Amino acid sequence: AQRVTQPEKLLSVFKGAPVELKCNYSYSGSPELFWYVQYSRQRLQLLLRHISRESIKGFTADLNKGETSFHLKKPFAQEEDSAMYYCALTDSGGSNYKLTFGKGTLLTVNP
Amino acid sequence: DAGVTQSPTHLIKTRGQQVTLRCSPKSGHDTVSWYQQALGQGPQFIFQYYEEEERQRGNFPDRFSGHQFPNYSSELNVNALLLGDSALYLCASSLAGTHGYTFGSGTRLTVV
């Protein structure tokens, strides 16, 4: 079974502060992990995926297979980062196509 | 490029009725997945269509069915609607063999 846990429903930080959104997963196969973001009144969009190892909008996430975690980090939060963030998992192979999402974390960056 | 287009944007139905939701994938994509997002929850996978066949199904009853057309567009049908079917229904398209999913804005279904 695939499971994604985002322990924080809400996270509030001040502008310029570091931010970390937690994501833990459970999967017996070979996982591929993603972070999706949904800004107010916009559609769900891909923020980053672990295989690309990119930094998008200053966010990074490292897959830790030992701790089964994929936490999202940004050293200096900006007000425009305020959004709903979802961690998602799928299989990196070719036979399992579904994305399993966590329940999401609502990030608010205060001025 | 309009991306993924879903229609209608909002819908109100009565318990027991049937509903059809529609999705046009992003240009160049050939695979369509459907998700249900209840209030306060993350999206849940309903099924995926590729080459006009249901390729994988999530944990949803048979009341949920779908179809994919030769132009890759897709429909989601829900029969015998229950109050618990009230949710945002998201369509995501991708190119087969990739995990680059593009999501639509969704259809908000309310069952009364």
Image (tube, coloured by chain):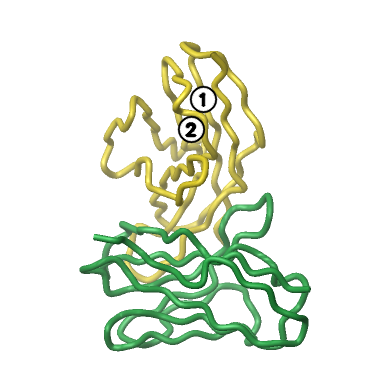
Quadrant in the picture for residue A74: top left
Q: Residues within 10 Å of mark 2 (few under 14, many from 20)?
A: some
Q: Are marks 2 and 1 on the same chain?
A: yes
Residue name at image x 48 percent, y 70 percent: B34
In the image, residue A33 lies at what x, y percent? 41, 47
Q: What residue lies at 32% left-to-right and 68% top-to-bottom?
A: A94
Check contact, mark 2 vs mark 1: CB within 8 A. Answer: yes
* Displayed quadrant of residue B102: bottom left
Q: Name the amino acid, label 2.
A: His
- Chain in yellow colour: A
Residue under circle 1?
A20
Residue that numbered label 2 is attached to? A71
On the rendered image, what quadrant is the C terminus of chain B found in?
bottom right
Please name which of the two marks, 2 or 1, marks the residue nearer to the observer.
Answer: 1
Cα gap from disc 2 to disc 1, whole angstroms: 7 Å
For disc 1, the chain is: A
- Chain B colour in the picture: green
